[in-house]
Amino acid sequence: MIRILAVLAALVCAAPALAQPLPANLDKANAIVIDTTKGRVVIKLRTDLAPKHAERIKQLARDGYYNNVPFHRVMAGFMAQTGDGQNFNGTGGSKYPNLKAEFSNVPFKRGVVGMARSSSPDSANSQFFICFADAPFLNGQYTVVGDVVSGMDVVDKLKKAPAGSQSGTVTDPDKMVKVQVASDVK
């Protein structure tokens, strides 16, 4: 009985996100739909700027790698980072090799999605972040891979690290419940 109630509760919570139409004129083959614990976020992937990074995100979405992955690092006024489907804490990457940087002149502004990496410019793999605000200090240092076209209000609601936290680590973080390429959404 408890399982049935849990399934019903999950369906009731997911229904509003699933019922949301995708933005008009969206290239569904080059966009991802992220259903989070706070609602739906739609990201247009910038294949014109970062084709290999965009392809990687689509591949991982199709692999189910991003499902139930937390926003492990969320810093108010800066960004929300996710995409570690290996260790769920920001230390992991996918089974695929790291990607060579695809830096561009596109500035990091509110809603821009960038690929996370280590100190090596060619170390992006699976993790990405969404900017809450302009972050010009990232310009030319990280790969711009997309733009939020719907759901920045959802991103704004993600649970954030305590004020003053240097790491941005979130306790009991919100999650990407399901991530799909928009053309695969039923």
Image: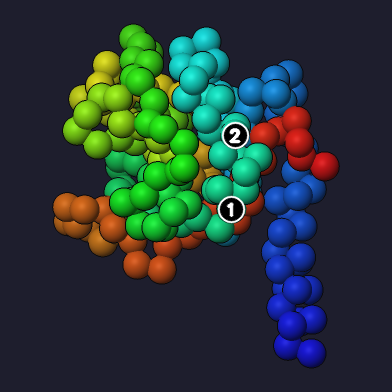
Q: What SS does tag 2 mark?
A: helix
Which residue carries the number 2 mark? Answer: 59
* Circle 2: residue type: Gln
112 displayed left or right of 31: left
Q: Nearer the viewer, mark 1 or mark 2?
A: 2
Q: In this view, does 131 lie to the left or right of 24?
A: left
Q: How many residues crowd around disc 2 within 10 Å: few (fewer than 14), some, or many (20 or more)?
A: some
Image quarter for residue 151? top right
Q: Residue at x 34, y 36 (%)?
A: 116
Q: Where is residue 64 in the image (x, y as percent from the top left)?
A: 62, 48
Distance Cα–Cα, label 1 vs label 2: 13 Å
For residue 67, which numbered disc appears in the image?
A: 1
The residue sitting at 31% across, 51% down in the picture is: 91
Whether residue 95 is visible to the viewer of this picture, yes or no, is yes
Rendered image coloring scheme: rainbow
Q: Quadrant of the C terminus?
A: top right
Dots 1, 2 in contact, CB < 8 A: no
Q: Is residue 118 above or below residue 90?
A: above
Instruction: Please state if 82 lies on the left or on the right of 108 as rendered.
Output: right
Disc tally is: 2
User: Which quarter of the figure has residue 88?
Assistant: bottom left
Would you say residue 42 is visible in this rendering? Answer: no
Q: In this view, does 100 lie above or below 123?
A: above
Q: Which amino acid does label 1 sit on?
A: Asn
Counting from the top left corner in percent of width and height, residue 39 is at 61, 52
Q: Which of 136 and 141 is in front in this view?
A: 141
Q: Which residue is located at x 77 percent, y 57 percent? A: 15
Q: What element carries label 1?
A: loop
Q: Which residue is situated farthest in the bottom direction here?
A: 1
Q: Which mark is residue 1?
A: none
Q: Quadrant of the N terminus?
A: bottom right
Q: Which of 163 and 69 is in front in this view?
A: 69
